[in-house]
Amino acid sequence: MKQRNMVSLLSLLCSTFLLFSAASMHGVEAMKEFKVGDDFGWQEPGSNNTSVYSQWAGKNRFHVGDSLSFEYKNDSVLLVEKWGYYHCNTSNAIIAFNNGKSSMKLDRPGPFYFISGTFDHCRNGQRLLVEVMGLHQSPHSPPSTIAAPPETLLGPGPLPSSSAAQSLFSDVTFYSVFVAHIFMLFGICCCY
């Protein structure tokens, strides 16, 4: 009888471990780091290449958890609101970097607006708008069918939002199942 109880306990522990492992990795790919501008880096573009950063952003897909790496010399990177982006306004930067190699984690879905801290550089095209999607999905996950509403060009920027609500459901589901397994394990231990 005691050996059967140990087998049941061991079986429950193994299933709890497998559930924990599967739930923590289910549907999520590795996060990526993108070097802004690839080999061009973060610098003022030439007069015939002012769309270099919009082209670079257009060929990449950004997800919550990814990060952007800016490499530059004698310049800076500012995270700004939408209005600051379109008007090259450096006075209300949310975050400012000026150390030559800066990294910014994309911690929420939605737009991120970056400009050079040098007004003329920004006016000449050294600005970047990235649209961040939700978490990375595994290749087996169905695509989302919800489209984002169109954005007006010169309206006020949206308030920053948190990605915490987005992952709340999956966290609650995982932890609910995990706690249920713990209570089952406790019940088996106490009954024998």
Image (cartoon, helix red, strand yellow):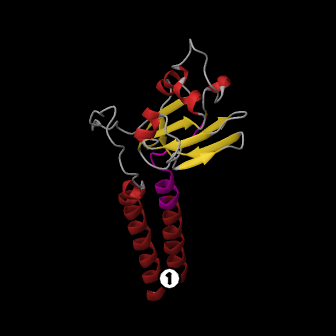
Membership of 51 in magenta stretch: no
Report whether residue 120 is seen: yes
Farthest top residue in view:
48
Q: Is residue 68 left or right of residue 143?
A: right
Name the residue located 34 percent from the left edge and 37 percent from the top edge.
Answer: 142
- State the image coordinates of residue 71 (x, y, percent, origin top left): 68, 34
Between 49 and 178, the one nearer to me in the picture: 49
Q: What is the span of residues highlighted in magenta in the rendered image?
A: 19-34
Name the residue located 59 percent from the left edge and 28 percent from the top edge.
Answer: 121
Label 1 neighbour load within 10 Å: few <14, some 14-19, many 20+: few
- State the image coordinates of residue 146 (x, y, percent, origin top left): 27, 38
- State the image coordinates of residue 167 (x, y, percent, origin top left): 40, 56
Name the residue located 30 percent from the left edge and 33 percent from the top edge.
Answer: 152
- What's under tag 1, amino acid-wise? Met
- State the image coordinates of residue 15 (x, y, percent, origin top left): 49, 63
Residue beneath disc 1: 1
Between 136 and 128, the one nearer to me in the picture: 128
Which image quadrant is residue 151 in?
top left
Asked if residue 187 is positioned above or below residue 39 in the image, the reply reads below
Name the residue located 53 percent from the left edge and 63 percent from the top edge.
Answer: 17
Label 1 residue SS? loop
Asked if residue 22 is positioned above or below residue 184 in the image, the reply reads above
